Image (tube, rainbow, N blue to C red):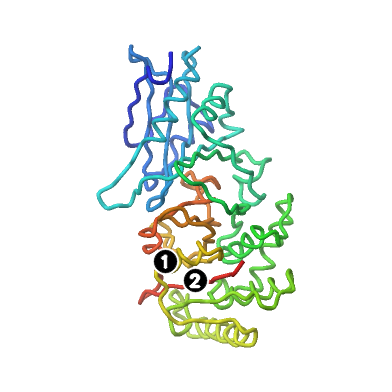
Amino acid sequence: MSAADLITAIVDGAHAPAGLTGDRLALWTIERDHWSPRTITVTDATGTVLATALTAGRPHTAYRKVVDLVVAEGAGANAEAAAIAALEAARDDRLANDDGSQPAPIVIRFEEHPTQAALTAAVRSALTAVGFAQDADPLPSVPSTRPEDAAFTRSWSLWLGAAPTRAVPYYGQTTDVTCGAVTSLMMFEENNLGQFGTDGTENHTVELDFWRRATNMPACEPIGLAVTTAEELLARTGDADRKPRVILSAEGPVLLEWYTDFYERKLRVQLQEESRRTAESLGLPVERRWASTEEIRDLVAEGNDVFLLIALEPLIKDPAAHWVLAHDVIGDSIIISDPWVEQEHGESWVDTSALPIPLAGIDLITRWGEPEYRGIIVVPR
């Protein structure tokens, strides 16, 4: 029997097949409603269920992830065909909401769980048959990146058109506050100027050291992050002409919205004034204007790495300011690597590495503060 002979159905929500227990059942029962979970069922002509798959994905992004694919024990000789049918259904599913928060995907990811759901030969063959390719493993950081951790995952990708040409070794931030530092450090890794290795503990030390120098306590504001990035670029390349520049629409200090105490706020203002003076002494351009999403796209397409200050709320329902790295463009989508993994709701590094976001989504998330401002850092290649 071939995959074409089987019947697929897709319904909203996560509906675990019977018989799952423990960690594998947890993949299906974790709360991920914001990620629009969908269940794919593959049956034969008699209605016998041969395979079941769960897909999910962040809103406003152009990807879907196959969280798990369960082939029924009774599938027998039809196991590979059933797995192929499920993967093809995931590939062809064009989930769309009336509010436009679910763009058509340009990549389908498959999340491999070596501990909870080791790949069977049938599923591995099906991945290859449908066109998935295994991605490079990430740098040891958050649990899903560490081979010794039960949460470790591997990534397989099926790009439905062009694929990214600029690979970024992925590293997830290991604290709540080091997103800016990790965004910059991933840029260095991409450019073969990195300091991360195979030891997660040593990597954590590198992460914290950079954050200590770049932080506005605890956030990294744009000018301060650009200053530390510039100092590191000079130290690692010796090229005094390769300087980041900041495009920031706000005229004064930023990322101060949560400071109500006069002295707490005053300290952050003073730190930002010091960063501004250092930027001037280093010759770093600071442009006080609003950068359009088309300009951001073009800057990335020209080969620059661009750090984006974003609001996480639309993506994962977390009301926090955040930094991500934009490093490639495919069609109308900007490819980012996001240091934050929302593990509590079923994310792994598979969700946050080489993540495509259409310009409408970029426009939505690159707004922060009251009144709204937009901040980016442009690092030339």
For marks 1 and 2, give the CA distance.
Answer: 9 Å
- Residue 353 x %, y %: 54, 50
In the visual, does 306 lie left or right of 372?
A: right
Q: In which quarter of the image is the C terminus?
A: bottom right
First in residue order: circle 1 vs circle 2: 1
Crowding around mark 1 (Cα neighbors within 10 Å: few <14, some 14 to 19, many 20+) is many
* Residue located 38% across and 53% down the image: 60
Q: What element carries label 1?
A: loop
- Residue 191 x %, y %: 66, 60
Q: Quadrant of the N terminus?
A: top left
Residue 376 badge: 2
Crowding around mark 2 (Cα neighbors within 10 Å: few <14, some 14 to 19, many 20+) is many
Residue 178 badge: none
In this view, 80 is above or below 250: above
Q: Is mark 2 on a helix, strand or loop?
A: strand
Instruction: Name the amino acid type tagged 2.
Output: Ile
In the visual, does 268 lie left or right of 366?
A: right
Pick the front one: 88 or 23: 88
Read off the residue under disc 1.
366
Pick the front one: 155 or 301: 301
- Residue 320 x %, y %: 45, 64
User: Contact, CB < 8 Å: mark 1 with mark 2?
Assistant: yes
* Residue located 48% across and 56% down the image: 329
In this view, 255 is above or below 333: below
- Residue 201 x %, y %: 72, 54
* Residue located 58% across and 74% down the image: 217
In this view, 111 is above or below 84: below
